[in-house]
Image (cartoon, helix red, strand yellow):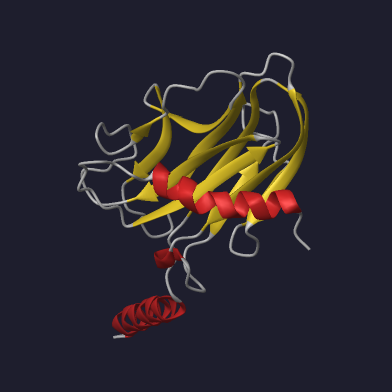
Amino acid sequence: MRSRNTLLAMAAIVPLALAQFARAGDPYDPDWELAFTSSIGAYTDSFGAAVGPSPATDGYDAGTDVLQPDPPSGTYVEMKTSVGGYWLTTDIRSPLELLVPKTWSISLYTNSASGLSGTNEILWIIPEPLNEPGNEPLLLIDYGTDETRTNIVSSVNMREQGSYSFSVTNASGVYRYLDFEAELVPEPATVALLILGVGIAGFRKRAAYSC
């Protein structure tokens, strides 16, 4: 059974996600947008990972990517990524290519001087274009406090669960390093056709050599 805090966080993620992607006066429409919400105690922030057609690139795109807003007064947390020297709250990349994974490197940050302690929960909403069985693998990779992103603490198949939690003690500054990874894989029918094509090509080559 989900905890009361989890249910409250889930109730909050939809308006947060909608606010996250509200870009007044911007007609750009990404192919898909995946919304994350990170909560610890009373502190919450959201992050968006998206892909779309030109002018979106894998670098910083002014007017398309969304910069991290100025922080509020008092203690706060941020869920963000660094691209081209800018901190972003929404990072829109170019479309996925077959078998070429894209990675959004996400940092969780707090300005708490005394440090935050407790359970940090991350929730996500998988958008409809990605919500079909057998579509792109979606992974959330947790590196803990390893800023080199070398040692994996946990790797989550986001299609099999809708949240991920971890405990923190006296968190201050950047207190968690995460990667979101998406990859476009061929459908089984496409793989079968590719295998068939390779087999026919090999047969033709062997037939030519035998002549």
Q: Position of residue 107 (x, y in %)?
A: 56, 31
| Residue at x 59%, y 63% (from the top left corner) | 159
Count up the numbered dots: 0
Q: Quadrant of residue 96?
A: bottom left
The quarter of the image holding the C terminus is bottom left
Residue sitting nearer the eye, 92 or 149: 92
| Residue at x 39%, y 39% (from the top left corner) | 91
The quarter of the image holding the N terminus is bottom right
Vertical placement of residue 173 versus 98, above or below: above
Give the left or right position of residue 101, taking residue 43 as reference. left
Give the left or right position of residue 143, taking residue 200 as reference. right
Q: Position of residue 181 (x, y in %)?
A: 52, 49
| Residue at x 35%, y 44% (from the top left corner) | 93
Q: Position of residue 178 (x, y in %)?
A: 60, 38
Residue at the limit of the structure toward the top, as seen here: 113
**Residue 69 in view, yes or no:** yes
Residue sitting nearer the eye, 55 or 48: 48
Vertical placement of residue 191 versus 153, above or below: below
Q: Position of residue 8 (x, y in %)?
A: 65, 51
Give the left or right position of residue 176, taking residue 99 as reference. right
| Residue at x 31%, y 47% (from the top left corner) | 94
Vertical placement of residue 105 versus 129, above or below: above
**Residue 101 in view, yes or no:** no
Q: Quadrant of residue 48?
A: top left
Vertical placement of residue 180 versus 78, above or below: below
